Amino acid sequence: MKDPEEPGDGDGDGDGEQPSTVDGNPEQASHVDGDRLARLLGDPGLTWLVERIRRRMERDEPLTGPVTLPTPTPAERAAAERLLGRGPGAGRSLTVRLEAVDAVLRRSAISPGGLAPAITALTGPVTSIADVRRREAEAWQDAYTPLADVRPELTAWTDRLRQDGLVRRLARTPQAAKTLLTNTTTVLRELPANPAISLPAFAARVLGDAHALDDGTPLATVVLSAVRVLTDFPDGSGAEWRREAWASAGLLKDALSSTVLTLGLRGTPALDWMTDAGEPAVLTLRQLTHIPPRTAPAVVYVCENPTVLVTAADTHGPACPPLVCLQGQPSAAALTLLRHLHTNGSTLRYHGDFDWGGVRIAEALLRRVPWQPWRYTAADYRTAVTATPLAPPLTGTPAEATWDPGLSLALAELGVRIEEETVLDILLADLMR
């Protein structure tokens, strides 16, 4: 209860520059006469007073000045009067000066050290709130020490992690946070995994717990935030996004669900057979991590939409040059295949929709694997717009085409979208060269 006359005895935190009044001298405390003290201050009518004094001690506030109880009961008023040996007071409130109580304790030899050792003897050791907060701050600072071992390219990520409150929300306590970040650094030292490995198998090998990186665990949340930085994987959400994000670091949650469409690609018995038959092949992430193509063509064409690949199969059959289809955002399987081909010498040539979504997909791919535009420049867009008078209007939020900044300017200027299917004849003609 706050004393009107005394702002320092309210419900605020009370952390000031005053010296602590908590008397921790065991010799002084041992001189307290416990039995007499209990009779003097242990009266239920003085509970409010004892609590006020203890609260001041916790806040390192001086044990001086008045404390006031606005609406005392008769029992509380009588107890205070017995304590101080004074007659009935006037007024609706009850005020007790702490110096007076301290004097009673010293004069009676119940507590020669005064109020502080008396309250400690009566109610138990008093811990300074400032000390508690200081120790907690030190514990949180220590909790982040495992991040010092994280690789240099994650420095900005560790700085952000210290500031954004994610670890505190996930771990709740400094001890749990230190364990979380210790395990995080242990995982990150092993990433990206090469060759790719099952996520549960990786967790079992590195952490001794196959479920340590299951969806929803604090560890999975923190590690995924670092994986996005390590692999430059785009922001997102949902089960499919998490699967692809893990896969970008070589950890396979589901090596069969992530697939990529190909046509005319050779290098395994299955691919050779499909290419000879002129049929598209669907490659899973598992196939690509266990048995990648043994050969890398000089040029590999890459498109965004399946219609291009299917029509190429119908038109060119076994004669079609190597063609890979992203089917929208590049999957883990697509990225694995294209990285493998690029690493082994293939030049990748990419085409996508001429719209803001298409530009974003192209940028997402370019951040992960180099490619050259395949009729996917500002000049190609302007030509296609001229040939398509009924093209639909462009919608969505603009995006930057870093491979050709003029393309973004042209899209904003002309304001229409050109889908891959619109320029299909031109793309198919290129595949015959």
Image (cartoon, helix red, strand yellow):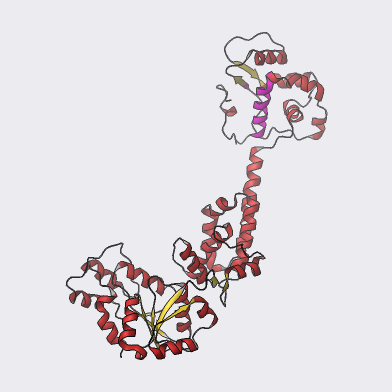
Q: Residue furthest left?
A: 389
Q: Residue at x 80, y 34 (%)?
A: 26
Query: Which quadrant is the C terminus positioned in?
Result: bottom left
Where, by quadrant of the figure, is residue 113 drawn?
top right
Q: Residue at x 64, y 67 (%)?
A: 204
| Most foreground residue, 44 or 302 | 302
Would residue 96 be found to the left or right of residue 105 on screen? left
Confirm whether residue 212 shows in the render.
yes
Query: Which quadrant is the N terminus positioned in?
Result: top right
Q: Position of residue 332 (x, y in %)?
A: 47, 73
Would residue 266 be found to the left or right of residue 82 on screen? left
| Most foreground residue, 17 or 294 | 294
Write the start and end of the magenta stretch as one range.
45-66
Q: Position of residue 161 (x, y in %)?
A: 54, 57
Confirm whether residue 296 shows in the render.
no
Q: Residue at x 67, y 14 (%)?
A: 75
Prevalent SS, magenta region = helix
| Most foreground residue, 416 or 271 | 271
